[in-house]
Image (tube, rainbow, N blue to C red):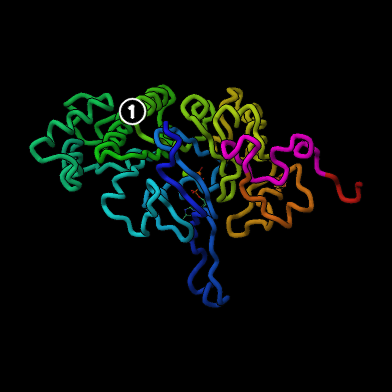
Amino acid sequence: MTGEPVLSAAGVSVWFPVGSRLGARLRNQQRLLHAVDGVDLDLRRGEALALVGESGSGKSTFALALAGLRPVDGGTIRFDGRVLPRRRSRADLRRIQMVFQDPYSSLNPRMTVGGMLRELVRVHHVVPSSECDDYIRELVRLVGLGDDALRAQPRQFSGGQRQRIAIARALALRPDVLVADEPVSALDVSVQATILNLLADLRAELGLSLLLISHNLAVVRHLCDRVAVMYLGRIVEVAPTEQIFSDPQHPYTRGLLAAIPKITDSATEFAADGGPAVAGDMPSALRIPAGCRFRTRCPLAREICAQTDPGLVAGPDGAVHQAACHFAFDSVTARVPRQRDGEE
Ligand SMILES: Nc1ncnc2c1ncn2[C@@H]1O[C@H](COP(=O)(O)OP(=O)(O)OP(=O)(O)O)[C@@H](O)[C@H]1O
Ligand code: SF4
Ligand SMILES: [Mg+2]
């Protein structure tokens, strides 16, 4: 890992207009759901970065924006330092590939695996056509399948095998970055580890940078170099994995970690069912609280939290550990419980 960012988001926002058009016209205003609301995040070359947060925090929308599959409404995305245009070229789209939770969604059910891969490789001119057959045979072997897989259709495979094919499809375009959005959560527990190990092996073998979205903290801890925590459309903490687990700075991160044993006995997952990991509900992305967006659920909230948006600040170790809290990196102040009204 060089530490150089391969993919950088700066102030990236994605909004969804909601409600009927008629309603919007009658009220003379458009309601916008701020699914991703000013995200700053770097993915470094060769690293595995985890993106975690409760259901609805904006992880998938952000991932789609990074991959160029959803337009951004604000901010910039850079690849190797170059700003990617709103409409990406085919070459730029190739560089960032996604693996989805449901492998079936990214596979054409009517084509054989070989036909699908061959078409992809030809359309994108990945290798000369004389090398195409060897190339796709190599691809399916790379993901642990035999040559006979090339003659079958996706429905003929198990869930785990289908995810292997989806990974082969993503790798066919020789991407620099793989964005995996909960790649194993729809699979049998018995095959989850094999797919995750495959991703880890491929990353090492091919020098890929990996953004892994997962609710499973054991997986995150095992596979990822760094962790970014997302809350209500914004990154609220990012740090090397062990620092997130041993010295979380944001009250939301602490809440997620503290809630683990209450939610599962395995102490490895939070809110895997999309349920709350921290007391209270996440506010709607239609009405993001002013000041610190976590203040409505934060046990440490004070007056300043309603007035000023803290923004991501770096700790004493430089930019390695960052948190968006007025009281981060201040071990005394940050852990003082919130005063009740009327208390000194
Ligand atoms: N196509 C859409 N139209 C309107 N709102 C959307 C759309 N897609 C997502 N949203 C909203 O954007 C917010 C972020 O959703 P997103 O799916 O990105 O969250 P997530 O963190 O991936 O959640 P999960 O962990 O459940 O996958 C949510 O409020 C969601 O309801
Ligand atoms: S800024 Fe205030 S409300 Fe926000 S996380 Fe920190 S203490 Fe809590
Ligand atoms: Mg999602």
Residue 183 lies, in percent from the top left, at 41, 35
On the rendered image, what quadrant is the N terminus found in? top left
In the displayed structure, does residue 29 sit left or right of residue 192?
right
13 or 7, nearer to the observer: 7
326 or 153, nearer to the observer: 326
In the displayed structure, does residue 330 sit left or right of residue 138?
right
Q: Is residue 6 above or below residue 17?
A: above
In the displayed structure, does residue 167 sit left or right of residue 187?
left
The residue that label 1 is drawn on is 202
Q: How many marks?
A: 1
Residue 51 lies, in percent from the top left, at 50, 39
Residue type (three-letter) at the residue carrying disc 1: Leu
Q: Which residues are magenta?
A: 314-338
The answer to whether any part of residue 132 appears in the image is yes
At 46% from the left and 27% from the top, the residue drawn is 223
At 53% from the left and 70% from the top, the residue drawn is 30
Residue 173 drawn in magenta:
no
At 36% from the left and 29% from the top, the residue drawn is 203
Using a 10 Å C-alpha cutoff, classify the residue at mark 1 as few (fewer than 14 neighbours), some (14 to 19) or many (20 or more): some
